[in-house]
Structures are given as C-alpha cells and as structure tokens.
Image (cartoon, grey):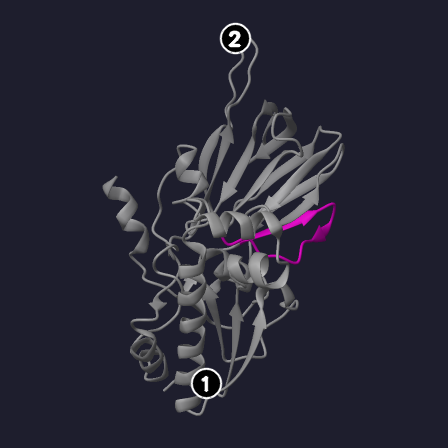
Amino acid sequence: MAQLAKVLIVFKKSTFQIQAVEHKEPRFLKLLEEGHANVSKVKTAHDEHYETLELLQSELKRREIKFDSVARADLGESADTYDLVISVGGDGTFLDASHAIKTAPLLGINSALSSSFGHFCLANRLNIPQVLDDIVNDVIKPWPLLRLELVLNGTTLSEPVLNEVLVCHSAPAGTSRYFIEIDGVREEHRSSGLWVGTPSGSTGSLKSAGGAIMPITAQQYQYIVREAWTRPGQVYQLTSGILDRAQKMFLSSNMRTGALYIDGQHIDYSFSLGDDLIIGVSKYDLMAYVDPNVNDIFLED
C-alpha cells in the first residue's frame, strides 16, 4: 500500500476570488452585475472550485492523512518532502505544481468541470474518494512523464519543462532570429519563434502548429519552427523533428530582446544577443497519476 503520511495541496485562486473578493476590481464587478458574457461563468466556477477543495480536505481528514495547503502563487521551490502533491484547479495549476517537483508524485484534480478541460487531471469532485482509495491501495500507479531541462549560458534553469518552451522575440510581432544546431547541422533562422515540447505538450501549442500528437508516456520530444522566413531559393533543414532522450538542441540568440517562455506565459527568461541555450531531456521525469491514453482523444479530430 502507498504510504501517504503527508500530502501537499496546491490550489489556484479562482478569477472571482481574485477580481471580485480580493481586489474588488470595478470593471470586473460592473461586468458581473450586468451579466456580461465574458464573466457570466466565473461565479459558478468559483463555487465549484472551492466545493471541490473542501471535499478533498474532508476526504484526507477522514483517512487521517496530514496535509498542508498552499496557493499556487505562493508555492516554494521544492515540494519533494511530501508523499504526494495534489493540484486543485486545472492544467495550469498542475503545470505550476510540477515545477516544484523532482521526485514526488503528482495528482491533478479538475475543480471546475463546467469551465476547465483538465487534461492532466485524473480526478474531479465526482471521483475524489475512489481515486484516493486507488492510490492508497496501489490500484493505480504514477506514470513517468518526460520533461525537458534548459541550460542557459551554462546555468540549469530551475523549472523542468513539462509541456513546452517557446523561443522567440519578446514582442509578438518581432522576428525571432537565432542559430539552431542538432546533430552537427547548424542553421541561422528567421521565424516567428521555435516550439520545443514534450509528449505531454503535444496536444496543445505543438498540435496547433502542426506537430505530431504523441502518447503522453512517450520517451521522445519534438520541435517545430513557427512561420519560418526564407530568402528565395533558401531551404531550412531544421524546421521540425522528433528527438530521442539522448539528443540535445543547441540555440544561440541573434535577438537584442529575445525571450524564453516555459509552460505558458508566466515563466520567462531573457534570451538576448549572444545568449546560448541547450535543450535536452531532464533526468527527473514527472511521476504523475494520469490516464496513459489521455492524448488519444486528439487523434480522433
């Protein structure tokens, strides 16, 4: 049986909680009062979210499992002292929690079924008791999900990449200029940016950019150049590809104001002229309670 002596709950704050309760943002409150379509669902999602959080805490108490709770914005650098980390929110909360984990297993709970897709989330308010029982009784096991490691100018960045990293100009309309090298082939590119992503991220931005959908437990990663620009007669070799765990990518910035975005827009690093980046597979797979076939639904599109 799995020993769950202590659990960490990482929860998001709902939009309603932040905008209406904490900040009392006038524009948001006005739109809410008017029943505007852009905010009409936020109160429902708020109620669902906190009901789910309370249910989880109740179920842990009933099982006499000790737990700490922390808002995802206040999460520290490491959660590996816990036997299990549980994210309560959606995929964004799951991603945020994953950045603080090297070895601890992670379970995602979709807390608002009315508004959240919850691709990574094996649990929701309808099955929390069953999923907890299955974990404790070893009916289900965590799966290893490949993550990427980024080494910027010789320093390994603290966040392992679970979905993707975007290498681009810091302005959306700016041209991304960089040198790329894989297996000894080196090219100078101009494009809208470069996606490098994992199997976990293959159903999101990578899919939208024309990438391959991979099983979430696959042990390869892929890259896709966005909107490559070439001179007449010029052809790039390195516009897309799938790499194995042993292969690395080498990038050098040719931009005055370039940037790296990790798993979305919240984590970014400067990638300025002359900066060097090495992308490879992290030695720390994320051990996650997920459906190993979850990516298959996108193959039906």
Residue at the far left in the pictured view: 300
Determine the secondary structure under disc 2.
loop
The residue lying at 52 percent from left, 59 percent from top is: 16
Specify the quadrant of the image occupied by residue 251: top right
Q: Is 250 within the magenta? A: no
Task: Please give the range of residues in magenta.
Answer: 148-162
Q: Residue 29 in the image: x percent, y percent?
A: 55, 53
Three-letter amino acid code of the residue under disc 1? Leu
Determine the secondary structure under disc 1.
loop
**Would residue 172 be found to the left or right of residue 162 on screen?**
right
Q: Residue 103 in the image: x percent, y percent?
A: 53, 71
Position of 176 relative to 51 (above/below): above
Q: Residue 265 in the image: x percent, y percent?
A: 59, 46
Q: Earlier in the sequence, mark 2 or mark 1?
A: 1
Q: Pointer 2: residues within 10 angstroms few (<14), some, or many (20+)?
A: few
Q: Which residue is mark 1?
A: 4
Position of 279 relative to 232 (above/below): below
The residue lying at 64 percent from left, 42 percent from top is: 260
Q: Which numbered tag is attached to residue 164?
A: none
Query: Split into 4 quadrants, where in the image is the N terminus?
Result: bottom left
Query: Split into 4 quadrants, where in the image is the C terminus?
Result: top left
**Would residue 18 be found to the left or right of residue 139 on screen?**
right
Three-letter amino acid code of the residue under disc 2? Gly
Q: Which residue is mark 2?
A: 233
Q: Nearer the viewer, residue 75 or 283?
A: 75
Position of 268 relative to 101 (above/below): above
